[in-house]
Amino acid sequence: MIFKLFTWPIDTVKFVGEKVKEEVDKELYDLETIQKKLARLQMMLELGDISEEAYDSEEAILLERYRIAKQLEQEGG
């Protein structure tokens, strides 16, 4: 009983940390979110809001996230 009393704060912090990580991963590797960001990025380039270099850099990041998301989806995660 005393052990549970002392470990409760640690267990709670661990639980909250795991939930936050799950939500961050869901946001980073959600296929629909990535597709929307790619479309928005393309629009920004076409409107001249960003440079070609900025577009290329951000596109590379998003495409890598998309690749990982597809891999995770295929693995059932």
Image: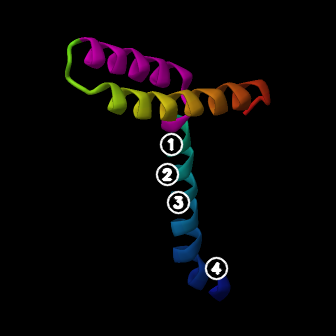
Q: Position of residue 7 (x, y in %)?
A: 60, 80
Cα gap from disc 4 to disc 3, whole angstroms: 19 Å
Q: Quadrant of the N terminus?
A: bottom right
Cα gap from disc 4 to disc 1, whole angstroms: 27 Å
Cα gap from disc 2 to disc 1, whole angstroms: 5 Å
Cα gap from disc 3 to disc 1, whole angstroms: 10 Å
Residue hosting label 2: 20
Give the mark nearer the N terminus: 4 vs 2: 4
Residue hosting label 3: 17
Which kind of residue does numbered mark 4 sit on?
Answer: Lys
Residue hosting label 1: 23
33 to 46, vertically: above or below: below
Q: Magenta span covers which residues? A: 27-46
On screen, residue 54 versus residue 48, left or right, reads right
Give the mark nearer the N terminus: 4 vs 1: 4
Q: Position of residue 29 (x, y in %)?
A: 56, 33
Q: Between 37 and 59, which is closer to the camera in this rendering?
A: 59
Cα gap from disc 2 to disc 3, whole angstroms: 5 Å
Cα gap from disc 4 to disc 2, whole angstroms: 23 Å
Q: Around disc 4, counting alpha carbons within 10 Å, would you say few (fewer than 14), some (14 to 19), or many (20 or more)?
A: few
Nearer the viewer's eye, disc 4 or disc 1? 1
Give the mark nearer the N terminus: 4 vs 3: 4
Q: Are marks 2 and 3 in contact (CB under 8 Å)?
A: yes
Q: Residue at x 45, y 27 (%)?
A: 59
Which kind of residue does numbered mark 3 sit on?
Answer: Gly
Q: Residue at x 40, y 23 (%)?
A: 37
Q: Residue at x 41, y 33 (%)?
A: 58
Residue hosting label 4: 4
